[in-house]
Amino acid sequence: MRTYDELYLGERWRPSVGDHTVEVRSPATEALVGRVREAAHGDVDAAVSEARRALDDGRWSSLPAAERGEVLGRIAKIVQGRATELAALISDEVGSPRRWAIGGQVGTAVGTLRVHRALASTYPWEETRPGLLGGEVRIHRPPVGVVGAIVPWNAPLFTAALKVAPALLAGCSVLLKPSPEAPLSAFALAEAAAEAGLPEGVLSVLPAGPAASEYLVRHPGVNKISFTGSTAVGRRIGELCGRDVRRCTLELGGKSAAILLDDVVLDTTTVAALVDGAMANSGQICIAQTRILAPRSRYTEAVDALADAVTALRVGDPTDPETDLGPVISAAARDRIEVLVESARNTARLVAGGGRPDGFDRGYYVRPTLLADVDPAAPIAQQEIFGPVAVVIPYDDEADAVRLANGTPYALAGSVWSADAERAAAVAARLEAGSVAVNSSAAMDLGSPFGGMRQSGLGREGGPEGISEYVEQQSVIVPAADERRR
């Protein structure tokens, strides 16, 4: 049981002006595992004031980028040193299996912080180029200002690091708004930041419900919002920021496809990677490749191999190191997934799973499920499920595979699998998706831009492109030397 009776505002613990609390319950056992104070409107005001004061006096933004990068490196070291503790925390609040919590949650957060530490010395904070009319143009990239970073519950530590690291490196102040379902790891990250020497006022943590969250988005003292979550909420945030012409980055929903080319080698390693790409963290990841497109010439072979692998997955207690899949986040999520699967069974073929696993009197468990012969236009092939459910869809040729892969409103990620990696890369380049992996389900590289097209979002996170989302671009146009004395 972890209790935070005060809010973390500007690197200091303070009482909330409100009296509401958020209870955090394990999706595996339904037991109470944490309680935090919920931020009210007045707390948002106080956090914005602290963030603005820290920005204006330059206690953080005026430091050389290399020094800011060193602080990120120290945060990474502290988080790495607490990996076991943090993985247990994430297993408690999210239900992530312990193995995945270590690598897919803590490991990626540490990697993100370290990548940005390295980028401190290579990102072009200042640049000079020849002016087209003579003289030179000096380009400055100052911080965008106060950032509201709104993160989801499914990968709370990693997504927080993915926003906090570039924003801090750019010199911004950050208001981190975790999901009410998983606020505990956000406090752990803030504690690590304070221990690493982040100055007061630069980082606050604001667990908040819908009203205070929208108040944060609307707040005139916030210069930019970075949001990861559903397309519906992202659309609302984009509308609110657009009214005030304020910047926003939106990493939204996905319905990613894995294309199996006709020469793919369906060995144990490949099939396991495909299943992991669809169902890791019980399918609760934005880049889950839940639409598996197989050539008709090898369709039966692919379906049978995938069905065997899905059936073999071990569902259970997320603290058990042998567990492959834990629960989904809530009863509402479980019920929604079950309705989608049952509806799909009217026209598709259930080849693995379906329903709830036996032996679980408590917790929100869903049996890993595979459906074949799915209509590409069916809801289960078009909607983001966010659960351990995948579909297999046949295609005729490469052009048909590309058409099907691009045939949803989402365009976040994907993968292409072939015995010829260059052939797969050529097909990948034809997909409308922000990132596509070749012979891997890891459709994300921490040092490269990540984000979606169409209804999967706006902007990019990761790499130097991600840092550019947190800086302004100022051009100072200086005349040639012989004209400077006018």
Image: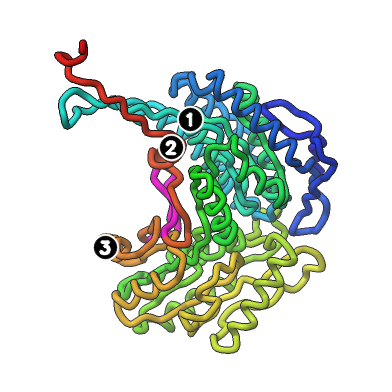
Secondary structure category for the residue under label 2: helix
> Going from the N terminus, do you reach mark 1 or mark 2 first?
1
Q: Amino acid at mark 1?
A: Leu
Magenta-drawn stretch contains 100:
no
Q: Which mark is residue 169?
A: 1
Q: Are marks 3 and 1 in contact (CB under 8 Å)?
A: no
The boundaries of the magenta stretch are 439-453
Question: Dividing the image into 4 quarters, which one contains the N terminus?
Answer: top right
What is the three-letter code of the residue carrying label 2? Ile
Say which of 188 and 136 sits in front: 136
Q: Are marks 1 and 2 in contact (CB under 8 Å)?
A: yes
Rendered view: 166 above or below 402? above
Closer to the observer: label 3 or label 1? 1
Q: Which residue is mark 3?
A: 426
Task: Identify which residue is drawn at 48% across, 33% down.
Answer: 144
Question: Does residue 263 sit above or below 425 in this rendering?
Answer: below
**Can see residue 86?**
yes
Cα separation between marks 1 and 2? 8 Å
Decide if residue 400 is on the left or right side of residue 482. right
Q: Along the horizontal axis of the image, is 311 left or right of 65? A: right
